[in-house]
Amino acid sequence: MNKLLMPLLAVVLVTACNNEEKKQATLSELKPIEVKYPVTRKDSTVFDTYFGTKVADPYRWLENDTSAETATWVKTENEVTNAYLSLIPFREAIRKRYEALFNYEKYSAPFKEGKFTYYYKNSGLQNQSVVYREAGDGKEAEVFLDPNSFSKDGTTSLAGISFSKDGSMAAYNISEGGSDWQKLVVMNAVSKQLTGDTLEIKFSGASWKGNEGFYYSTYDKVKNGSRLSGVTESHKVYFHKVGTSQKEDKLIFGSDATPFRYVWVGVSEDQQWLFIYTANATYGNGLYIQNLSVPDAPIQPVITDMNNQYGVVYNDSTNFYIQTDKGAPTGKLVAVPVANPDTANWKTIIEAKPEVLTASSGGGYIFCSYLKDAITKVSQHDTSGKLVREIALPGPGTASGFYAKQEEKEMYFTFTSYVNPATIYKMDIASGKSEVYKESKVQFNPDEYESKQIFYTSKDGTKIPMIITHKKGIELNGRNPCLLYGYGGFSVSLTPWFSTSTIILLENGGIYAVPNLRGGGEYGEDWHNQGVKTKKQNVFDDFIAAASYLVDNNYTSRDLLAIEGGSNGGLLVGACITQQPGMCKVAFPAVGVMDMLRYHKFTAGAGWAYDYGTSEENKEMFEYLYKYSPVHNVKEAAYPATMVTTADHDDRVVPAHSFKFAAAMQASQKGANPVLIRIETKAGHGAGKSTQQTIDEQTDKWSFMFYNVGVLPDYD
């Protein structure tokens, strides 16, 4: 059972004790040591003027990721953070426990390519999962591709792989240090021999046309800075012929006239159609098609206005089956005649429901996955839209997968929840019957824990769902450590998902709470739009109200509450603690968008304007952003114990956001709580981290939280 400790003054160990002294240290022996932050230079000459308002930007120099001064600042900040974390006496005990929890075999759902069945497997503590394959001839599985061989430290990851229709060729993405700029490497999948083709791409994979080559998209250039911080422009579609250089690739679609447009591409399973999607923002897209069976066929526009979402789920000789939210904020499925795809000929075959739809296909059927208050429900339909059956799931939670090639007879799906480790099921498509294929071997007993969904009231009266997870029989006395996690943006839905890391909290009597904030996609586009642009404050209010609910109902107290969010969720945490510094004891703003006046000036940030608006759009939008932008709203106050996290290879939300926010927070902190920044090296926005990086990161997170809320984890 946890032992609540006397509140400790969080400190930075400037003169570090040696390792033996650290081992012998106990909480009672620790004495407060003054926090000494690095002195971050302020440049009083840097200003921007927006609609007559002069805005200072004293830490603008931290945006220069290639300067020696920034490198020195990063090094010094990490030294301070590492020294602080090294002082926590139970840090190594947490690491040891998390390594034990993480050390179990992990599998992906299998997928078929040609004569082989492929799957990902991690033996336990491998830095990257290995791709295996089986030929179905009774022989043991063989290693197909081992990303652990890509780099000595495991920080280069496999970011995707695609196969030609017959499975004889493959192209795989390599991400170095988590960067969105990736290498695309071509290989003969039968012999496993590389062809020598290596391409440079961003936000794309390969979509094969036969075995001769593939379509992909990438950016032509970077303006106003380095690959990490500069603006990316001119996303275009190319065709690469195997055996040639990337310089020879044929431009298929896109031009410099649309510099901030995203473009991605896919070839239909029957190899007859090329689908090209375009988008100016993270919501809404256009759709173009090309008949690949007709030489030099023109690229035909189907949707060009980009005011709604459109995605081709499946096609046969008669129809394209497209999911859209046009006139249906939760989504519907339409049949579009191949012969004449004009919108006037579209026919709705699966009407919109109150629940949010995600459609997929397999074995000649359509599968509709619905979100009911963030819980998955799945139904199977024929191509006329007729219901075949409801798919039986193991219980309330998240089921994902439900995709297979059209000739296949079975498919795989994964089921999980906050208290159910991910289990892979194999389903017979004809009967809908499923059976367990792979069970998780993680050291966790779901019977000892429970998740329940409640609805609380936000500031404006809106009811917000939240799932709260903890040990069964826990006493609601306000004395339980609690982590509140949120996102609230870009129509992203937070659904129940098991995390090995969260066991550390739960088994120590903690509570894990996840609200489905406005701005997300849990209730469709209407829910999303209630949290965009000049309605963004709704998201922050929803999160603040969630914290109040947990405190008011004695799940926890302000002194035992931590809040966390990443990316757009990092903005959420940053905005909440600058608006209400006393809302929690600990804050984890991770890879956050913190400078809302300049976010669109870095990498692909301009594409986020649908959700955020921009400071240059109009005076009203500038004033709204300026009012909540975390970097611009730090003031002298007693802030929570805060550990800002970012990574040196994050070229999506560039680390300058976190650098500037941490510098401002350190200069303004008036309380005893520490404000630290943890800057991961050889890592990006989140995906592709090595197992060692993940263990280190989660160890530091829980150590920082427990120490600052005064809870001693029950580990020897």
Image (cartoon, helix red, strand yellow):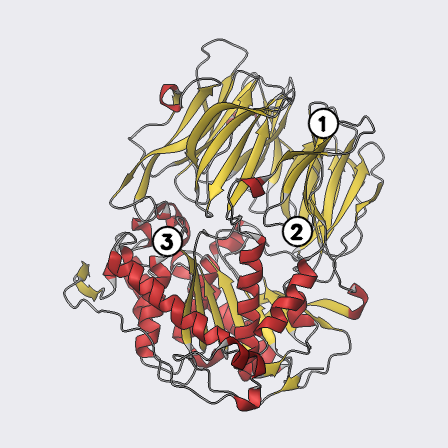
Q: Work out whether residue 704 or residue 309 is closer to the camera in this orientation and state it.
A: 704
623 to the left or right of 145: left
Q: Earlier in the sequence, mark 2 or mark 3?
A: 2
Q: Earlier in the sequence, mark 3 or mark 1?
A: 1
The residue pinned by badge 2 equals 371
| Spatial separation of the CA atoms under disc 1 and disc 2 | 33 Å
Q: Amino acid at mark 1?
A: Phe
Q: x and y percent of residue 527 in the render?
A: 53, 55
Indicate whether 663 appears above or below 186.
below
| Spatial separation of the CA atoms under disc 3 and disc 1 | 40 Å
10 Å crowding of disc 3: few (<14), some (14-19), many (20+):
many
**Circle on res. 116:** 1
**Circle on res. 654:** 3
Q: Quadrant of the N terminus?
A: bottom right
- Asked where in the image residue 272 lies, by quadrant, the reply is top right
- Mark 1 and 2 residues: CB-CB less than 8 Å, in contact? no
Q: Residue at x 35, y 60 (%)?
A: 657
Q: Quadrant of the C terminus?
A: bottom right
10 Å crowding of disc 2: few (<14), some (14-19), many (20+):
many
